[in-house]
Amino acid sequence: MKPDYWDRAKRALSKRDPVMREIIRAHPKVYLMQRGEPFFTLARAICGQQISVKAAQSVWDRLVACCTSIDPQSILRKKRSDLRACGLSDRKVEYIADLAQHFADGRIHLHRWPDMEDEAIIAELVEVRGIGRWTAEMFLMFNLLRPDVFPLDDLGLQKGIRLAYYKGRKVSLRTMRRVGETWRPWRSVATWYLWRSLDPVPVEY
């Protein structure tokens, strides 16, 4: 389902930014879609870190088969050796177990998130081992559908800005941040369209 703000954001971005208007026009029937529930989404993000999409899918399929249900209790009940047998590295086993423990202990405050600012949620998520700012920002965009996330560390976003606004020339992050300021409060939407300018097929996070 399309986010309720999507069409409003498209109109605002198109009105104020001619470059963005052309990118949006080139991709008329696609939009950001929500990905899964919180624990499942974060566990899958950890599983896929630093390996190919194909390898990540293989490991994830084995993990699903091993645990039957991807939830904190199922993960915590499993022996570490069983999780490693799914293809997870020792470090990723520690990360997913730490994520599960954070949820089980109530250190992840799902019920408060609707009233929390983006930065407060990011600060909470990066307390989990294996979750950095980029993963937290992807989560805000794809799971919580927050409209104004600007993941400037993302290489795809950087490339999209360079190609669309600077003819591929190298520019500073400060300059890119200044470009992003013109998109508030719809920076998630602008980012998503810049990704589409590089790859028309949306990627799952």
Image: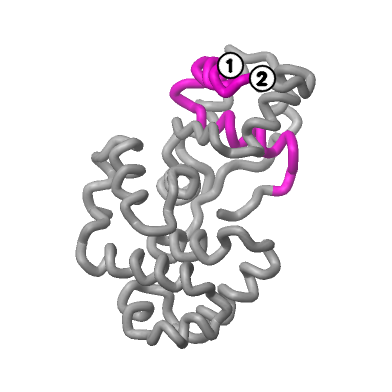
In this rendered view, identify the residue nearer to me: 95 or 37. 95
- Can you name the residue that lies furthest to the right here? 167
Q: Residue at x 62, y 34 (%)?
A: 157
Q: Residue at x 33, y 36 (%)?
A: 119
Label 1 residue SS: helix
Residue ID for mark 1: 175
Q: Around disc 1, counting alpha carbons within 10 Å, would you say few (fewer than 14), some (14 to 19), or many (20 or more)? A: few
In this rendered view, identify the residue nearer to me: 37 or 168. 168
- Up-down relation of residue 70 to residue 198 (above or below): below
Percent x, y of residue 27: 72, 35
> Is residue 182 in the magenta section?
yes
- Can you name the residue that lies furthest to the front here? 90
Which portion, as a residue range, is magenta?
172-201
Q: Where the C terminus falls, by quadrant? A: bottom right
> Is residue 170 in the magenta section?
no
Percent x, y of residue 98: 34, 66
Percent x, y of residue 132: 44, 48
Which quadrant of the structure image shows residue 192?
top right
Residue ID for mark 2: 171
- What's under tag 2, amino acid-wise? Val
Label 2 residue SS: loop
Which quadrant of the structure image shows residue 190?
top right
Which quadrant of the structure image shows residue 117?
top left
Disc number placed over residue 110 in the picture, else none: none
- Up-down relation of residue 70 to residue 43 (above or below): below
> Can residue 22 be seen by looking at this rendering?
no
Cα gap from disc 2 to disc 1, whole angstroms? 6 Å
